[in-house]
Image: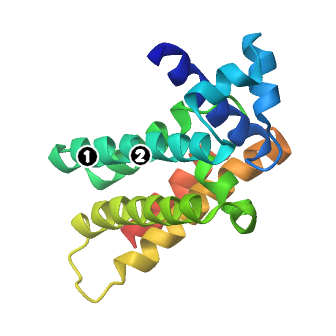
Amino acid sequence: MENRKSQIIDLASSLIRKKGYSTFSIDEISRHFGVTKASIFYHFEKKEELGLAVLDQLYQGLVNFKSVIQLSSQSVEEKLIQYCTYNSRQFVEYDICPTSSLQSDYEMLPESMRQKLQEIGQLELSIIDEIVAEGLDDPTINTRALAITILSALKGALQYNRGMRDNFIPDIMYGINRLLKN
């Protein structure tokens, strides 16, 4: 049973990355598995519960990543590359970031999902902020502003990847590293 529940969460996450939360349906998931919608509702009574499970999975993955990266002796550049690799490993070619996809559906999300999405956004920013701060000697530099810039560039690159069928991540990483060295 737990395996099927995980499969449902993984499929929902994939559908969110491909087409957004508001456009996938429980019916689509039940057809994929060749089961009735009642079988899906056995695990998740509402689509909102499934959305929260996807968000919880994303959040826990980021918490685990943060723990690993904090113990790492890698350089700032290597940690940023590791973050980028961590985030993109869960995507099929030309998928977009699930948090970005959900953020684009923000006004249509239930309040419980909005709150969890905000927590994830803050966690993402704190991870990048900590990485950037560890590589800078000047305490007057606004590391949060740099973290927002980096995160926006990475997520924007995924959008461009999708729209132009190209991989902009290496170029973005080059630009980010140049920015941090100046």
On the image, which quarter does residue 131 sit in?
bottom left
Left or right: residue 20 versus residue 41 is: right
Q: Which mark is residue 83?
A: 2
Q: Residues within 10 Å of mark 2 (few under 14, many from 20)?
A: many
The colour scheme applied to this rendered structure is rainbow
In this orientation, which residue lies closer to the viewer: 76 or 1? 1
The percent coordinates of residue 116 (x first, y second) are: 49, 59
Which amino acid lies under the numbered mark 1 shown in the image of this protein? Answer: Ile
Q: Residues within 10 Å of mark 1 (few under 14, many from 20)?
A: some
Residue furthest out toward the top: 34
Quadrant containing the C terminus in the rendered view: bottom left
Left or right: residue 159 versus residue 121 is: right
On the image, which quarter does residue 172 sit in?
bottom right
Residue for badge 1 = 69
The percent coordinates of residue 115 (x first, y second) are: 51, 65
User: Eyeballing the image, is 157 above or below 16?
Assistant: below
The percent coordinates of residue 146 (x first, y second) are: 44, 74
Q: CA distance from mark 2 to mark 1?
A: 9 Å
